[in-house]
Image: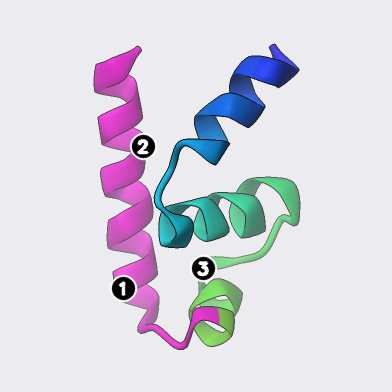
């Protein structure tokens, strides 16, 4: 399972990978991620929602 998850995260584009790492592994809020990434918080939320929808479709 860990290897599959690592492979799945590694396959993501850099910005999506960063959001996943900050959200899931570091427990950061969307507000914190937005500050770190220099993006608006709604952009971070939208991208995470799109990523999750895409992954659900691929599963």
- Please tell me whether residue 7 belongs to the stretch shown in magenta: no
From what the image shows, is residue 43 above or below residue 46?
below
- Evaluate if marks 1 and 2 touch, with contact meaning CB atoms under 8 Å apart: no
**Tag 3's secondary structure?**
helix
What is the quadrant of residue 51 in the picture? Answer: top left
Marks 2 and 3 sit apart, C-alpha to C-alpha, by 15 Å
Give the magenta range.
37-59
Tag of residue 59 = none
Q: Name the side, left or right, on which 34 lies relative to 7.
A: left
Label 1 CA crowd tier, 10 Å (few <14, some 14–19, many 20+):
few
Which residue: 51% across, 68% down?
A: 30
Nearer mark to the viewer, of 1 and 2? 2
Tag of residue 30 = 3
Q: Earlier in the sequence, mark 2 or mark 3?
A: 3
Q: Which residue is mark 2?
A: 52
Q: Position of residue 23 (x, y in %)?
A: 61, 54
Label 3 CA crowd tier, 10 Å (few <14, some 14–19, many 20+):
some
Q: Earlier in the sequence, mark 1 or mark 2?
A: 1
What is the quadrant of residue 47 in the picture? Answer: bottom left
What is the quadrant of residue 26 in the picture? Answer: bottom right
Which residue: 31% across, 73% down?
A: 42
Marks 1 and 2 sit apart, C-alpha to C-alpha, by 15 Å
């Amino acid at each position: 399972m860990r290897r599959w998850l690592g492979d799945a995260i590694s396959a993501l584009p850099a910005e999506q990978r960063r959001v996943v790492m900050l959200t899931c592994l570091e427990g950061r809020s969307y507000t914190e991620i937005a500050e770190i990434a220099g993006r608006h918080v709604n952009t971070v939320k939208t991208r995470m929602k799109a990523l999750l929808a895409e992954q659900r479709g691929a599963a």
